[in-house]
Amino acid sequence: MTIVTNTLDPLARSMTHPRTSSRRDARPLPRAAGPFEAYRLGASDVQVQVRDLSLAGCIVEPEIYRGRHIRLQIDLPGEGWITVQGDALRRQGPTLTMRFIHLDEATRARIERTVERLSGPAPW
């Protein structure tokens, strides 16, 4: 896995390093490229793939769009399944950019460990 830091990506633009409070210091968060097995939860669960996973969000493929709020269940290698909630930020072709909301500390720690393990050292 590699760190994805494409600043043209809308998700990367919306993510700043967690220790900074200024958008002027717009270093993207480390991300694991994936893909990760996942399910979009709803009236009927739909299998999807998650890519570009970070503490701030991810890319969902294929784009299964039914409203702004999304619930996903994601299988993190070495960590197991997590359930996250998020907002749809942008639809582009077959993908949907999702920003996580209301991550509890345990889920945040599991995502952080997964990204750290799969992405290698941070570029800064």
Image: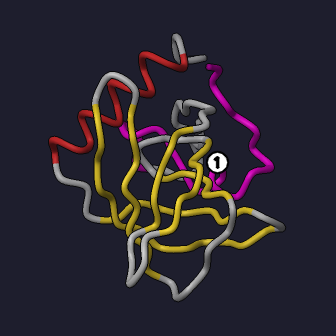
Q: Which residue extends farthest top? A: 121
Type of residue at label 1?
Ala
Q: Please give the range of residues in magenta.
A: 1-21
The residue that mark 1 highlights is 12
Specify whether residue 27 is painted magenta: no
Q: Which residue is painted at 35% across and 36% down in the image?
A: 111
x and y percentages locating residue 69 in the rendered image: 43, 80
Q: Residues within 10 Å of mark 1 (few under 14, many from 20)?
A: many
Please determine whether, in this image, residue 111 is positioned above or below residue 63.
above
Please determine whether, in this image, residue 118 is positioned above or below residue 89.
above
Predominant secondary structure, magenta span: loop
Q: Which residue is painted at 38% across and 34% down in the image?
A: 76
x and y percentages locating residue 45 in the rendered image: 43, 70
x and y percentages locating residue 81 in the rendered image: 30, 43
53 sits left or right of 123 in the view: left
Q: Which residue is painted at 26% across and 42% down in the image?
A: 108
